[in-house]
Amino acid sequence: MTQHKENPLKTLQEIRQLMERSSRFISLSGLSGVTAGVIALIGASIAHWYIGKVPFQGYDPLTPIRLSSNGIPQIDYLFFFGLASTMLVLAVGAGIFFTTRSAKAKGQKIWDALTQRLLINLCIPLVAGGIFCLAALLHGLIFLIAPSTLLFYGLGLVNASKYTLPDVRYLGLSEIALGLIGLFVPGYGLELWGIGFGLLHIIYGSRMYFRYEYRQ
């Protein structure tokens, strides 16, 4: 009699798990987060070295700057654009590689309607944030860029979390918190950026890997 009661419960649990898998992109690899975090920390270290700044000692929110021949401060756009672009390409490349490998190991498709919905919900805040940061740059509000990237990235993660692993939501909320803090302490924007995109990615990526991928 007990067996007859347990079997329906077990069947319902299996059905629930199948429905959850079909509505969430579970092939997201934690190793991609760890790799992205390491890349971000390296990039932040290079930026600190380039502007000659010791971390966590504060700085003028208008830096990084160089002085032109007439003594007028000018932002070195080319260097930081190149650095940011390189980090983005490396991080996205690592994400595609590890996530594709994870999907193949689980016998799942890497590109379907669910993946499209995830990317759309992620990209809407990211595109809005990119436009906001461009406007801040054009108006000389450089100190807003670092915390704004954290803020809009966190919003993107929260927005997309309903289509993937629940850990992504908590990562997004952490990024939002750091971004909001950075708006009030602009002299530490680069450090908070390193913590958000570097350290938090490593922590959450490691947690996701050992929770969902290790020995599976």
Image: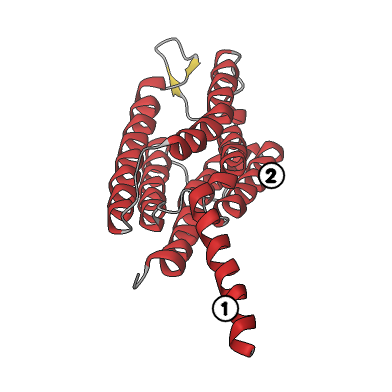
Residue drawn at point x = 62 percent, y = 43 percent: 158
Task: Decide if residue 95 is on the left or right side of residue 10.
Answer: left
Residue 46's quadrant in the figure?
top left
Asked if 36 appears above or below 132 in the picture, the reply is: below
Indicate which disc residue 170 carries.
Answer: none
Mark 1 — residue? 7
| Residue furthest right in the image | 184
Q: Could you tell which of marks 2 and 1 lies nearer the N-terminus?
A: 1
What amino acid is at disc 1? Asn
**What quarter of the picture does the C terminus occupy?**
bottom left
Alpha carbon separation for disc pair 2 and 1: 51 Å
Mark 2 — residue? 181
Please tell me whether mark 2 sits on a helix, a strand or a loop.
Answer: helix
Could you classify mark 1 by the number of other residues whose Cα lies within 10 Å: few (under 14), some (14-19), or many (20 or more)?
few
Please tell me whether mark 1 sits on a helix, a strand or a loop.
Answer: helix
Residue drawn at point x = 32 percent, y = 43 percent: 96
**Mark 2, mark 1: which one is toward the viewer?**
1
